[in-house]
């Protein structure tokens, strides 16, 4: 039942998101939208599930490097941890910078920048596979003798630190703090699509790296900021959010002549054209342009929120007991979660496939969970069967009502 440091921090993340939400509510500032926030959190759920499935591979590579490639082995104590944490942040800076300047890596990291809002929920909006394709950047750490457990702890704390900087509720910190550490002000610049802010402030914890390597940009007082990516995603589909850039890159490769030019597109900066040797000009953001907000019936929103709460609870339980499950159940339960967040995205967009998909999902979840309890925990089967049947039936009836309400609303609008 052991879990990662980040896993046990998740309840505190939700608590802080709730506090920030209330703060802006009483200030009468609209910094949260339900569909955007749930999309952020859905991608975070997928990131945690994908991470649970791949962490054995990633951590195994670190252990192998430590055992076979290490130049020497350092003792595990507070001093080596501090050094490792500092060095980890240095490598994180370059990994993050590559995530913006190398198309192949940007295709994964773009997920974190798609939200057009800037609040604490955005911190949890993460790629499902960026950790797998970028972990090699941290291989110097085990080679230099740092214990993989110390490396893992450094990475977890580095990630936890970056949660609080995703907010507009905090202005600038004291000058000495801003000079050394990453702050909400510095990170707002990083998420902005204003031309002078693009590809700036890549630091994780220590801002000194950006200042050393020429990528630092201070937030300008009074300068409005537009968040997101230069081309709106226009979708609440979490799978599309993870793969859309690679589809665009593939289409661009097909339009580009010459094998060398095609391959160059993978490693060159996003927006670079190898045939003309030029980069796309970043346009000044249009602050009058509407943020993407699919025309969703109010009942769809409430139903999606209800189902998402169930998904969050189920995912937390799943991740806590992850190590105790067989590979088969890990795959089945992971499929349930990915299927669920995909359907929730479809409900927000009122996609036709989501209607049938939701009924299939409800049956899939109820049968899958109860089969697990029947095979592994028969003592709790009655309680689980009763609970899941009630929630499943309630969801079935409620969603049927939602579909009718949506159809009725559409007819009135047409009339």
Image: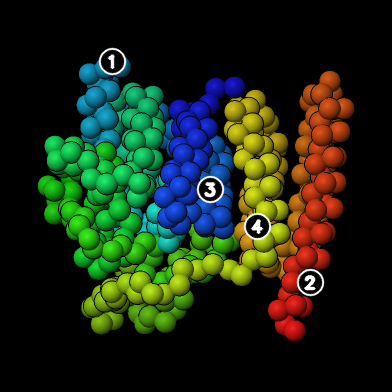
* Label 4 – label 1 distance at C-alpha: 50 Å
* Label 3 – label 2 distance at C-alpha: 30 Å
In front: mark 1 or mark 2? 2
Q: Is residue 92 above or below residue 81?
A: below
The residue located at (24%, 78%) in the rendering is 278
* Label 4 – label 2 distance at C-alpha: 16 Å
- The image quarter containing residue 413 is bottom right
Query: Are discs 4 and 3 less than 8 Å apart at CB?
Result: no
Place of residue 215 in the rendered image (x, y in percent of width and height, measured from the top left)? 18, 55
Q: Earlier in the sequence, mark 4 or mark 2?
A: 4
Q: Which residue is labeled 3 in the image? A: 41
Place of residue 324 in the rendered image (x, y in percent of width and height, measured from the top left)? 65, 25
Locate residue 140 relative to residue 116 in the image: left or right.
left
Q: Which residue is labeled 2 in the image? A: 408
What's the colour scheme? rainbow
> Is residue 17 in sight in this rendering?
no
The residue located at (36%, 82%) in the rendering is 257
Q: Residues within 10 Å of mark 1 (few under 14, many from 20)?
A: few
32 or 135, which lies in front? 32
């Amino acid at each position: 039942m052991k879990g990662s440091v980040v896993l046990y921090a998740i309840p505190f993340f939700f608590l802080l998101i709730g506090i920030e939400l209330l703060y802006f509510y009483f200030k009468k500032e609209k910094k949260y939208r339900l569909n955007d926030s749930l999309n952020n959190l859905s991608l975070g759920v997928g990131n945690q599930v994908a991470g649970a499935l791949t962490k054995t591979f990633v951590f195994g590579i670190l252990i192998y490097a430590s055992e076979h490639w290490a130049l020497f082995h350092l003792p595990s104590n507070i001093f080596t941890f501090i050094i490792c944490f500092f060095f980890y942040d240095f490598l994180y800076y370059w990994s993050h910078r590559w995530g913006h300047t190398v198309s192949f890596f940007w295709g994964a990291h773009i997920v974190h920048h798609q939200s057009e809002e800037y609040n604490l929920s955005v911190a949890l909006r993460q790629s499902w596979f960026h950790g797998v394709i970028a972990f090699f950047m941290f291989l110097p750490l085990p080679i230099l003798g740092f214990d993989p457990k110390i490396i893992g702890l450094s990475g977890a704390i580095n990630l936890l630190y970056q949660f609080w900087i995703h907010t507009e509720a905090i202005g600038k910190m004291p000058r000495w703090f801003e000079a050394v550490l990453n702050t909400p002000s510095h990170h707002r610049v990083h998420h902005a699509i204003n031309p002078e802010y693009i590809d700036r402030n890549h630091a994780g914890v220590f801002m000194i790296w950006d200042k050393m390597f020429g990528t630092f940009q201070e937030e300008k007082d009074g300068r409005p900021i537009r968040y997101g990516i230069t081309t709106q995603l226009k979708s609440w589909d979490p799978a599309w959010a993870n793969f859309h850039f690679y589809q665009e890159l593939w289409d661009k490769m097909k339009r580009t002549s010459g094998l060398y030019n095609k391959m160059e597109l993978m490693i060159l900066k996003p927006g670079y054209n190898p045939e003309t040797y030029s980069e796309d000009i970043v346009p000044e953001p249009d602050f009058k342009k509407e943020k993407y907000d699919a025309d969703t019936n109010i009942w769809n929103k409430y139903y999606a929120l209800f189902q998402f709460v169930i998904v969050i609870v189920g995912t937390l339980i799943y991740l806590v007991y992850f190590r105790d499950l067989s590979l088969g159940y890990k795959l089945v339960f992971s499929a349930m979660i990915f299927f669920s967040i995909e359907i929730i995205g479809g409900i927000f967009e009122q996609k036709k496939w989501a209607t049938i998909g939701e009924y299939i999902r409800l049956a899939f979840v109820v049968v899958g969970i109860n089969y697990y309890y029947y095979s592994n925990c028969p003592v709790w089967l009655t309680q689980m069967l009763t609970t899941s049947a009630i929630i499943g039936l309630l969801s079935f009836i409620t969603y049927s009502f939602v579909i009718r309400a949506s159809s009725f609303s559409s007819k009135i609008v047409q009339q």
